[in-house]
Image (spheres, rainbow, N blue to C red):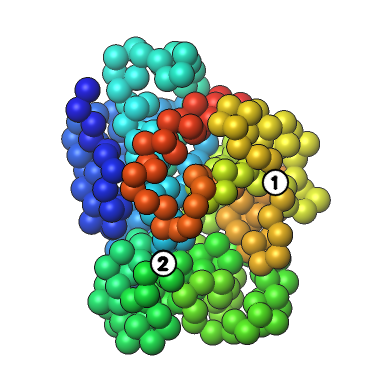
Amino acid sequence: MQRIVTAQQADSGSVRGLINTLRGRFGFLEAMPIGQSVLGRDIQGLILGNGRERILYAAGFHAQEWITSLVLLRLIEDLCVALEKGGNIADIRVPEALVGRSLVFVPQVNPDGVDIAIHGSGSAGKYAAMVRELGGNRPGEWQANARGVDINHNFDAGWETIREMEIKNGISSPSPRQWCGEAPESEPETAALTALCRRADFRHVLALHSQGEEIFWRYGDRTPTNARVMAEVMAASARYTVSQPEGMASHGGFKDWFIQQTGKPGFTIELGKGENPLPLEDFENIYAKVHEMLLLAALM
């Protein structure tokens, strides 16, 4: 079978093109506008299925972690092929497995940041000078959005705590990484995702990051009792580790906010191992290790 989603740099244009190609190939794959980035790039969503049980997969929060977008898009492609042909993924018969479910995908939460990470400060529009001064042209440096806000520190979950931790570490203004912004949900990328969750009533959510081959499942006293078992099932499938984030990764994230707001399961999955950005030659191996896990996540 000739693949649509192959190993390639997943900048905003490539992701947009892959989404359009997938929708052209699979007529049952629906578009869902999510919002726009700081610089007006579309944050695009896709829906598979029309069941009442909704599960959200989101990727591309951090600019250097753009390989997560490719993994999610490949999963969408494989699910569509299996639905069209009545086929299986990892011995799971997909058409029957997804009955009663709707899968919502947001392949690239931070398109501005990804373009900066891949192409440099020239992709930052009116923020180009600031991004350049902050080191946006240094390979492997940029994780934030175009305004120098780390999207996964900008959610309203322990935001004041993460802000104090950042200040102690010398981060109190726009930065390539780990600045929480002026206020919770100050960034349109963050607000777009929280608005989607408020209207969609998801059963649970998964946020794809890289790297570490770990799954984070807990946040505060609203963490549901079934979340650890779900994380352990996923981890066993991929031979990942169930872990707890530490330090400045312990607050302000999307799964933190979702758990705190809803009392439902939320997971951060750290794909692959190495140093971000993970090399494209790792893509097939990363996907092969996690595709069953990502499908199981929809079935629990």
Quarter holding the N terminus is: top left
What is the quadrant of residue 156 in the picture?
A: bottom right
**Label 2: few (<14), some (14–19) or many (≥20) C-alpha neighbours in 10 Å:** some
Q: Position of residue 91 (x, y in %)?
A: 47, 13
Query: For the residue marked with disc 1, what is the amino acid?
Result: Ser
Q: Which residue position is annotated with label 1?
A: 243
Left or right placement of residue 246 versus residue 17 in this view: right
Picture residue at 72% right of the left edge, 31% below the top:
229
* Secondary structure type for disc 1: strand
Q: Position of residue 176 (x, y in %)?
A: 47, 75
Q: In terms of depth relative to the viewer, which is nearer, 81 or 190?
A: 81
Looking at the image, residue 30 lies above or below residue 88: below
Picture residue at 45% right of the left edge, 58% below the top:
276
Left or right placement of residue 136 versus residue 269 in this view: left
Picture residue at 24% right of the left edge, 52% below the top:
14
- Is residue 46 visible in this depiction of the protein? no
Please give the count of numbered marks on the rendered protein.
2
The residues tagged by marks 2 and 1 sit, at their Cα atoms, a distance apart of 25 Å
* Secondary structure type for disc 2: loop
Q: Position of residue 133 (x, y in %)?
A: 38, 87
What is the quadrant of residue 224 in the picture?
A: top right
Query: Which of the labelled discs sits on residue 140, or is there none?
Result: 2
Query: For the residue marked with disc 2, what is the amino acid?
Result: Gly
Q: In terms of depth relative to the viewer, which is nearer, 221 or 270?
A: 270
First along the sequence among labels 2 and 1? 2
**Label 1: few (<14), some (14–19) or many (≥20) C-alpha neighbours in 10 Å:** some
Q: Of all residues shown, which one is farthest toward the right? A: 221
Q: Nearer the viewer, mark 2 or mark 1?
A: 2
Picture residue at 29% right of the left edge, 18% below the top:
84
Q: In terms of depth relative to the viewer, which is nearer, 80 or 241?
A: 241
Looking at the image, residue 1 lies above or below residue 248: above
